[in-house]
Image (cartoon, grey):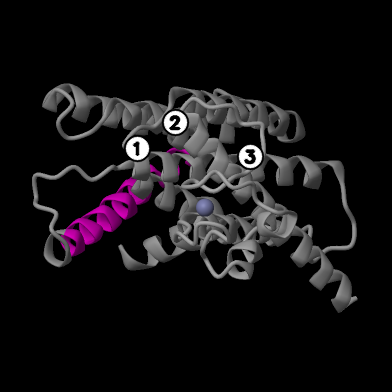
Amino acid sequence: MEILIFLKAVFFFGIGAIFGSFLNVFVDRGERRESLLGTSHCDFCNKKLKWFENIPVLGYFFVKGRCSKCKKKLSVQYPLVEFCLGLLFLAIGFKTGVILSFSFLLINFVDVVYFCMVVFLLVAVFLWDLKYMIIPNKIVIAGFVTTVIYNIFQYFQVSCSVFSLSCFVTENILGSLLVGGFFYALFAISKGKWIGGGDVKIGFWLGLLIGWKHVYPFLLVTYVIGAVVAIVLVNFSKKGWKSQIPFGPFLVISSLIFLFFSEKLLYLYKMLF
Ligand SMILES: [Zn+2]
């Protein structure tokens, strides 16, 4: 039985790494408005990659991180994103219970697909905002619609009254209004200096994702991570206090933490405060 668990774990990691490979292309070619189709090639000399160089994570090590023709260094972004998405998909396999249980129901399938889509879009936001300082509307809309559809599906499983505060649908709608509304207020007061328009838009999606009960700890974690990273950057690099640091990556890290550990975190938070 252990071998089955192991194989399922490898499967989840592998699928995640393959999607990570696509994510690199999705973000970089998306920003340059190039076609997502077409074969992978070296960024410097355009050499077409061989099949084994295209294997996620491992391909990078087969060529020792350099293009086999022009010998220029390949960006570590590629294996790093592939590895991280592999780990995240593996975590989804455990979170949804699919790796450890021996039955597989429709609801498990829907959960797996949903969480994989959310994680893919979140990591895309992380990379896009970090590299290009922008959160594309199409990703925010895709994420928002995905979460709405999933909530409707869940609603038919649970069917609670939307007029009750304890209903998850109400919790999520309130969460969306709270996070989005808070960011919009910051944006309006500072005329866009404290926070970007993309952050306001994604706030409505992330609030829907985490629900109002988690809004305060979510914002706390986001700003604490942001503050720590800002202090490190100012002290250990040439960045000054006035240089812009994208906010999206912090929102994504915090969202991922809440997506996977929300119950444990809420418990810890209640114990501490
Ligand atoms: Zn090359």
Q: Tell me the quarter of the picture where residue 230 sits.
A: bottom left
Q: Which residue lies furthest to the bottom in this view?
A: 2
Q: Earlier in the sequence, mark 2 or mark 3?
A: 2
Q: Which amino acid does label 1 sit on?
A: Tyr
Circle 3: is it few (<14), some (14-19), or many (20+) Cα within 10 Å? some
Circle 2: is it few (<14), some (14-19), or many (20+) Cα within 10 Å? some
Residue nearer the viewer, 142 or 100? 142
User: Residues in magenta?
Assistant: 210-233
x and y percentages locating residue 172 in the rendered image: 51, 33
Q: Which mark is residue 12?
A: none
Q: Which amino acid does label 2 sit on?
A: Glu
Side (left or right) of 7 relative to 50: right
- Residue 123 lies, with reference to residue 90, above or below; the image says above
The residue positioned 26% from the left and 53% from the top of the image is 226
Q: Name the residue under label 2.
A: 31
Element marked by disc 1: helix
Q: Which amino acid does label 3 sit on?
A: Met
Side (left or right) of 13 relative to 169: right
Side (left or right) of 200 relative to 111: left
Q: Quadrant of the N terminus?
A: bottom right
Q: Name the residue under label 3.
A: 117
Q: In which quarter of the image is the C terminus?
A: bottom left
Query: Is the residue under label 2 in contact with that under label 1 (CB below 8 Å)?
Result: yes
The residue positioned 45% from the left and 57% from the top of the image is 266
Q: For marks 1 and 2, give the CA distance.
A: 8 Å
- Residue 93 lies, with reference to residue 166, above or below; the image says below
